[in-house]
Amino acid sequence: MPTRNRVKIYVPDVHYHIYNRGWNRSKIFQDEEDYRYFESLLSRHLSTEKQKDSKCREYRWLRPTIRLKAYCLMPNHFHMLVYQTEESGISQLMSSILTAYTMYFNKKYKRRGSLFESTYKAVLITEDLQLMHITRYIHLNHAKFRTWPYSSYQDYLGTFRDWIDPASILELFSSKKQYEEFVDDYEELQRERDSVKAELANS
């Protein structure tokens, strides 16, 4: 039986939640340089202007076909929310990024073989309420999400990086402040739940 969300039939003009993790849950980011390199791959393909390598050759530019709406990089996995305008957008982006990152990682750490556990997973997101909640879920992945530098959370509050496009998600809220409160409210609720669980476990 196929793994859930592994068999993907893509359609244009919709959002997808994409995620993957390291082989046997091992780390895919060992240090700051690794996180930054992965982000540079996103920037390479999704910036508003085409980018070139050191020999002035243009990288594959995918901005017209796919937009990155939110992301979070964690030591052994990653999450992204993307919007694609063509069926091939996600396939092209993920093939380019994961191949390049695996080559970089294997060379740096003198290893061979697959870095990721399996083919990345992709979940179709169709409702505005789902979009609101999935961005919150992505941003809350790290316990110190307010200061975690390897996510798009600060891009929702005011930081601008042209390879991230949160505008359509923020339009679902009255202001950036409301989005911040939306995220904070869930964090507080989760803390209360964890506290109750701990009390029950110790009773």
Image (spheres, helix red, strand yellow):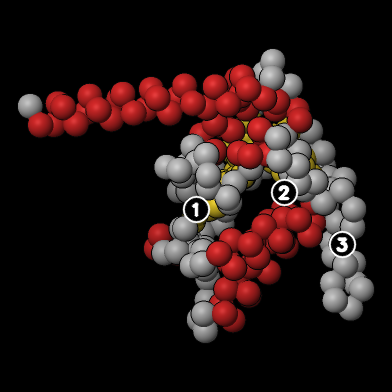
Q: CA distance from mark 1 to mark 2?
A: 20 Å
Q: Secondary structure at mark 1?
A: strand
Q: Alpha-carbon neighbours of circle 2 within 10 Å: few (<14), some, or many (≥20)? A: many
* Identity, as a three-letter code, of the amino acid under mark 2: Ile
Q: CA distance from mark 1 to mark 3?
A: 26 Å
Dividing the image into 4 quarters, which one contains the C terminus? top left
Visible residue check, residue 11: no
Which residue is identified by label 2? 90
Above or below residue 180? Residue 144 is below
Which residue is identified by label 1? 74
Q: Earlier in the sequence, mark 1 or mark 2?
A: 1
Give the x, y percent position of residue 23: 45, 64
Name the residue located 57 percent from the left edge and 73 percent from the top edge: 105
Name the residue located 58 percent from the left edge and 26 percent from the top edge: 180
Q: Nearer the viewer, residue 169 or 184?
A: 184
Q: CA distance from mark 2 to mark 3?
A: 19 Å
* Identity, as a three-letter code, of the amino acid under mark 1: Met
Q: Alpha-carbon neighbours of circle 1 within 10 Å: few (<14), some, or many (≥20)? A: some
* Identity, as a three-letter code, of the amino acid under mark 3: Gln
Q: Which mark is residue 51?
A: 3
Give the x, y percent position of residue 39: 67, 57
Name the residue located 49 percent from the left edge and 37 percent from the top edge: 140
Query: Which one is in front in this view, the residue at disc 2 or the one at disc 3?
Result: 3
